[in-house]
Amino acid sequence: MPQIQTDKQPVTQITIIEAEPEKQAEALSLMAERARFMQRQPGFISISLHRSLDGRRIVNYIQWENRDLLRAAHQSPEFRKAWGEFGKLTDDIDPHLYEVAEILADKQ
């Protein structure tokens, strides 16, 4: 059974972005650019972008080795510039941090 290591707990930031349907493609493009920037930062583990079928929401799951490294990436001028572009597309950006609570694995 997988064990959760609390001494080296990764952090997941889940961000939900609401955009008008006609702006979803542009918002998704900006998120992809931001993802490529984040991928080059220390502590990066993974990122995935999802778009809703109704064209209104983008959900971004990003995993980082720890909170401090995630915070450092967010404070970089490059990140701040990219994040500012979202203000033109939406007023509703909702990020939250999570820790792993349980891991389920396939019984092989």
Image: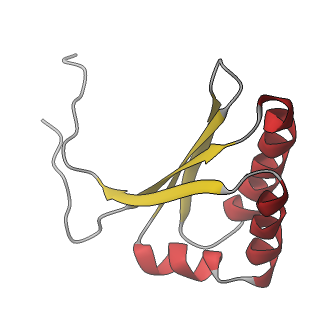
Q: Residue at x 56, y 50 (%)?
A: 46
Q: Is residue 63 left or right of residue 24?
A: left
- Residue 24: x percent and y percent? 79, 35
In the picture, which quadrant includes the N terminus?
A: top left
The C terminus appears in which quarter of the rendering? top left
How many numbered badges does the structure rendering display? 0
Residue 75, given in percent of the width and then of the height, sits at 65, 83
| Image position of 88 (left or right of 10) | right
- Residue 22 higher or lower than 72, as above or below: above
> Residue shown at 85%/58% (left/top)?
88
At x 53%, y 72%, the residue is: 70
Image position of 6 with respect to 16: above or below = below
Of 88 and 99, nearer the camera is 88
Residue 16 position, x and y percent, is 56, 46
Q: Above or below — where is 94 with respect to 105?
A: below
Q: Which residue is pictured at 84% across the width and 38% down the height?
A: 23
Q: Position of residue 36 (x, y in %)?
A: 77, 55
Q: Please tell me in which quadrant of the rendered image residue 12 appears.
A: bottom left
Q: Is residue 13 left or right of residue 89?
A: left
Q: Look at the image and name its color scheme.
A: secondary structure
Q: Residue furthest left?
A: 1
